[in-house]
Amino acid sequence: MTLEEAINLEHVKRGYKVTCDNHSPYAPTSGYVAYRQGHWTVPKVGCGPLAVFATYTEALDACNRWDGTQIWACCFIESKEKSLYYNNAAHRIQYHSDLIPKGTRFADAVMIL
């Protein structure tokens, strides 16, 4: 199955990824996850889903919260999880819903285009 076929069957969705403080268009980063154009990126082991936006407007609104951001067109596989979190050595840290930008979608995998 091609990527386009997966999108048409809604196994894969189109959206937008916002990255922060990236210095290279070939390896943008968001938090502790590195993204490479044309490659699938998944969350680190023990961490929750990745954050993406379904519309450019939602991504643009999120950019107003942080300096040094960039918006990338992406494809993503939607997650069944409904919150963002990561695990440190002793605890699971979950982001409060008030800190997550409006329109955030959760993804098990993201490919920036």
Image (cartoon, rainbow, N blue to C red):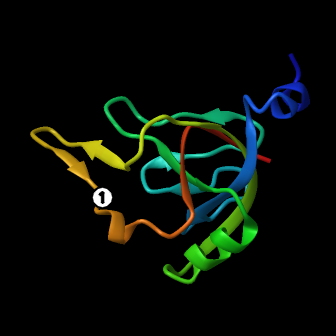
* Viewer-closest of 31 and 102: 102
Left or right of 32, for residue 30: right
What residue appears at the point 28 percent right and 62 percent down from the top-left corner?
Answer: 96
Q: Position of residue 74 (x, y in %)?
A: 74, 49
The quadrant of the picture occupied by the N terminus is top right
Residue 18 image-quadrant placement: bottom right
Left or right of 84, for residue 93: left
* Viewer-closest of 104 and 21: 104
> In the rendered view, would you say 24 is above or below 61?
above
Left or right of 78, for residue 14: right
Q: Position of residue 64 (x, y in %)?
A: 56, 83
Residue 6 image-quadrant placement: top right
What residue appears at the point 36 percent right and 70 percent down from the top-left corner?
Answer: 99
Left or right of 109, for residue 89: left
Residue under pointer 1: 95
Q: Position of residue 57 (x, y in %)?
A: 71, 74
Residue 68 image-quadrant placement: bottom right
Task: Report crowding for label 1: few under 14, some 14 to 19, many 20 or more residues within 10 A (C-alpha).
Answer: few
- Residue at the top extreme? 1
What residue appears at the point 22 percent right and 50 percent down from the top-left corner?
Answer: 93
> In the rendered view, would you say 54 is above or below 47?
below
What residue appears at the point 51 percent right and 69 percent down from the top-left corner?
Answer: 102
**Number of numbered markers:** 1
> In the rendered view, would you say 105 is above or below 1?
below
Q: Amino acid at mark 1?
A: Tyr
Q: Position of residue 106 (x, y in %)?
A: 52, 46
